[in-house]
Amino acid sequence: MTALFQKLASQNEQGSILIPDYICNIMFLSAKRAGIPYHTYRTDEQFRPDIENIGELLKSENVCAILFASILGTQNNTSNILQSIREIAPEVTIIFDECQNIITNSPLKMDKHTVVVISFNNKTVPGLMGGALCFPLDARLEISPPVRKAASKLRYELLLWAVLGKRILKRFQGVLMVIGGKVLNYELPSIEFSVCGNDHYDVEPNPASKLSMIYAYRGLCKLPELENLRRANYNLLNEEMKQRGEKIVIETDLIEISPYIPVQLTDIELFKYLPIKGPYSIEEDSTQSHRPDVFCIKNNNNGISYQN
């Protein structure tokens, strides 16, 4: 994302970008690293953009790009959104953040002033960092691939092998616990806030590693299978909630195949036996969130069915 923001900054002097108010704070860190100013626009309770608010910002600010993020199953990538913006700003760059939304049969629509960002960071498909920028054939925005010295590339590949080994070991330990009749307990989540401190979690533009691309390709090939597992998990959760007489799931467009199921929780002890992701922090305070009661159940990032 930083590489894209840097390109926008170089082509649009004093131009700013619009970013949704509820999103991972890494987006703001990337904008700062790229040296491009930004403003936030409002989203509703289902994480959809407030088009009227965006229109107001387009009139009052020098906007060169708008970021729409399809998060938690919400599809902020449709022809309706694209058309609504084009009626106001025909040539503004539209960025579709699909990092949580690599799916089959996507409703995504593009034109020559759009770009799509995808991630292989163990979100929609099992992955080991890395991602990609996708452009239409007649795109007006051109970005040169980043380069890295040979020694740095080797060091990064070895780092990812270590990350993969640690992940496999952790999963193996979990399997042994289940075989031994023990119940897996998960730490209660805190508000999500990243400082991008580790080498493989920074916001520097770098070429994707070979290991990351191999892992991503393997995950993409299994995408239909992963979506079927997610549907099964989602149906199981819904059935459990009906039996409890509770309504906590936030119904978004394609929630059944989202890697994260958004739920509103006041008593998170209810889900201490499921992997849960905390709410996103606000940009400037790691202890505060616009949606402090919105948590997410991690749904089958690694091809695991909760029915097993």
Image (cartoon, rainbow, N blue to C red):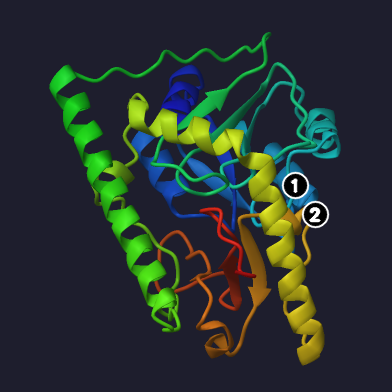
Specify the label residue 75 is tagged with: 1
In the displayed structure, would residue 111 be above or below residue 272? above
Residue furthest to the left? 151
Pointer 2 residue:
253
On the question of residue 45 being in view, the answer is: no
Residue type, label 1: Gln
Left or right, residue 222 beside residue 178: right
Q: Nearer the viewer, residue 240 or 269?
A: 240
x, y (%) of residue 169?
Answer: 29, 58
Kindly state the secondary structure of the residue where label 2 is placed: loop
x, y (%) of residue 261?
Answer: 65, 64
Kindly state the secondary structure of the residue where label 1 is placed: loop
Residue type, label 2: Asp
Q: Nearer the viewer, residue 36 or 197?
A: 197
In the displayed structure, would residue 267 be above or below residue 26? below
The quadrant the C terminus occupies is bottom right
On the question of residue 208 being in view, the answer is: yes
Label 2 Cα crowd, 10 Å radius (few <14 / some 14-19 / many 20+): some
